[in-house]
Image (cartoon, helix red, strand yellow):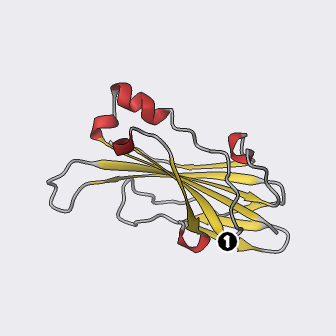
Amino acid sequence: MEITVQWVKTSWTKRSRGGEAAARRNAVPFGFPLPQLPSELAHFVQVSERDDFEPRSSQRDLRGIGVSLRDEGDRLRVLARVEPLFGLPPRPRRPPAVRLLPGQWVRWQLNYRFSSAAGIRGWSYWLDTFNIAYGPADRDVFLSEPTVIVDECGPVR
């Protein structure tokens, strides 16, 4: 069965935690139209403060994204991995894997906060949004409402 994956990675620093920069960051869509890709590749969209939150699209191998995908015959088992493990906020209790039926899709979101090891640089943040469809998907599938939403975003103050 066909599996379609889109990974939207939004990154920023403290400079974009308020005002106009925060408004631009908050306006970043969670899903984008899909390009034509071979089935073993994911659509990767990088959106960062350093590029003024303009999306940059590329491709990634499915094995290199932070999601475990397992075709169980009649369902697709999806579980986002927390990477890296030292990123805040703490996640003491994670939700279970999602099992999608053909024609369904999930939006899974995780956020992170980091500082440099020596504490010299300020905080940086990122939001990973994984959009995953099971079965044939049209190019605008991730612009609609998902069948399942998993929001693992925590406080990053």
Relative placement, left or right, of 81 versus 35 is: left
- Residue that protrudes farthest toward the top in the picture: 19
Q: Is residue 45 above or below residue 82?
A: above
Q: Quadrant of the C terminus?
A: top left
Image point (54%, 67%), residue name? 65
Q: Does 76 sit left or right of 102 as displayed?
A: left
Q: Helix, strand, or loop for circle 1? A: loop
Left or right side of 83 for 150: right
**Residue 76 screen position, x and y as percent:** 75, 67
Viewer-proximal residue among 96 and 143: 143
Residue 79 locus on image (x, y percent): 62, 65
| Residue 72 percent across, percent down from the top left | 78, 74
Task: Place residue 71 in its image quadrant.
Answer: bottom right
Q: Position of residue 124 (x, y in %)?
A: 31, 49
Give me the residue at 49% from left, 48% from top: 153
Q: Nearer the viewer, residue 22 or 147?
A: 22
For badge 1, the amino acid type reads Glu
Label 1 Cα crowd, 10 Å radius (few <14 / some 14-19 / many 20+)? some
96 over 145 or under it: above or below: below
Depth check: 58 or 14 in front? 58
Q: Quadrant of residue 39?
A: bottom right
Q: Determine whether, in the image, residue 100 is placed left or right of residue 107.
A: right
Give the residue pinned by disc 1. Answer: 40
Give the number of callouts: 1
Q: Residue furthest front?
A: 36
Quadrant of the image containing the N terminus:
bottom right
